[in-house]
Amino acid sequence: MGSRKVLAGARVVLPTGIVHDGRVVVDGTRIAGAAPADAEVVDVSGHWLVPGFVDIHNHGGGGASFTSGTVEDVLHGIHTHRLHGTTTLVASTVTGDMDFLAQRAGLLSELTEQGDLAGIHFEGPFISPCRKGAHSEELLRDPDPAEVRKLIDAARGRASMVTLATELPGGIDSVRLLAEHGVIAAIGHTDATYEQTVQAIDAGATVATHLFNAMPPLGHRAPGPIAALLEDERITVELIDDGTHLHPAALQLAFHRAGAGRVTFITDAMDAAGFGDGRYMLGPLEVEVSEGVARLVEGGSIAGSTLTLDRAFKRAVTVDRLPVEDVVAAISANPARLLGMDDRIGSLEPGKDADLVLLDGQFDLKGVMRRGEWVVDPQLG
């Protein structure tokens, strides 16, 4: 159990807006409405208090891969991202052999059941060879509903999301299957037309996997998937705000067309996040990370990112000039809602888990609390 404490004096970002000289009461593992008499008062004046970050698309970090690492490796990767404010994380796999992916699903589902992860995201193998990005083309396959079902069964009810190229044979039926089983069907690594994308949304798809990346560009005669995904209120769009995956104007276009309620910031992080430059493996493919940018050794495609969500938060506010409340929605509340966990996480409200991030006036991370315990102790004295 966490101790009883009152974090006082910060600018607190609540669903209703920013409270200046606000306070958050932590009682054990939860946020409380009133302070116990024996609560410790911690002065966090001059700081921002925001909800813990929620990452629904993340392949690893700290030198560890969620696709191929041991249990200890996966836990190390999770901890690396917690040090950067991500208190809730979905582990993403990359394209691999179906039996191998089913085996990984078993391992990751155990960590989900233990509360270390919030779920599993299968990115591949049901994606387009035309838009494969950093996925092995030899291992790609059409989204046969029976094979999609094999993966979600292997996850034992812990599958959160599957990314599909829904224009491929079996794509629409697979979207319907996922929707029936309460798993997010995400459109991504796709070569779909505008019309095919609309059909997939009508079938039950609700997320755009890293919008703009690994899909046809927006065209004035052939608008493609981007226009369909941005215009439909049923779709939440993932954005990677690392300065590499998206031009700032593209991010602004997506954010303002979809609105703050339909954007979720993700890292799409791979092993090098929070670790450093060098050579890594992403599934069966070799990746070179140089100056923080990950690219395939063969072909040069961008291979995930080295982003952490604290950096995404700071960039969104200081470079993209987005309102702090909108960034909090995109990095905490919206992904929590997508996961069906917004009754527990995603905002600083009484009764919810005491997951929070403390940022200084320049939006640099100073403290991270998860379920009432400091992961990063701000040591404010």
Image: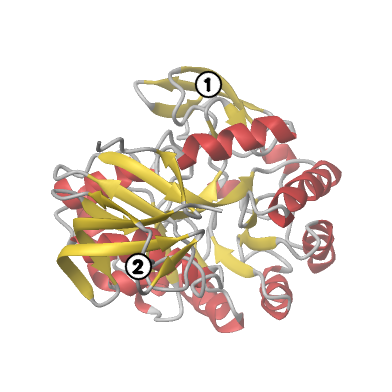
Point out residue 111 in the picture as x, y percentages from the top left corner: 71, 48
Residue at left 41%, top 70%? Answer: 32
Quadrant where the C terminus lies? top left
Q: Nearer the viewer, residue 296 or 361?
A: 361
* Amino acid, disc 2: Ala
Image side of residue 279 versus residue 100, left or right: left
Instruction: Name the residue tied to disc 1.
Output: 297
Q: CA distance from mark 1 to mark 2?
A: 55 Å
Q: Which mark is residue 35?
A: 2
Residue at left 15%, top 47%? Answer: 318
- 342, above or below 112, in the image: below
Q: Nearer the viewer, residue 9 or 234?
A: 9
Q: Nearer the viewer, residue 204 or 132?
A: 204
Image side of residue 199 versus residue 180, left or right: left
* Amino acid, disc 1: Val
Can residue 247 be seen from the camera position used here?
Answer: no
Q: Are marks 1 and 2 in contact (CB under 8 Å)?
A: no
Residue with the most extreme top position: 278
First-in-chain label (1 vs 2): 2
In the image, which is nearer the foreground, mark 1 or mark 2?
2
Point out residue 145 in the picture as x, y percentages from the top left corner: 79, 68
Can residue 288 be seen from the camera position used here?
Answer: yes
Circle 2 crowding by C-alpha within 10 Å: few under 14, some 14–19, many from 20: some
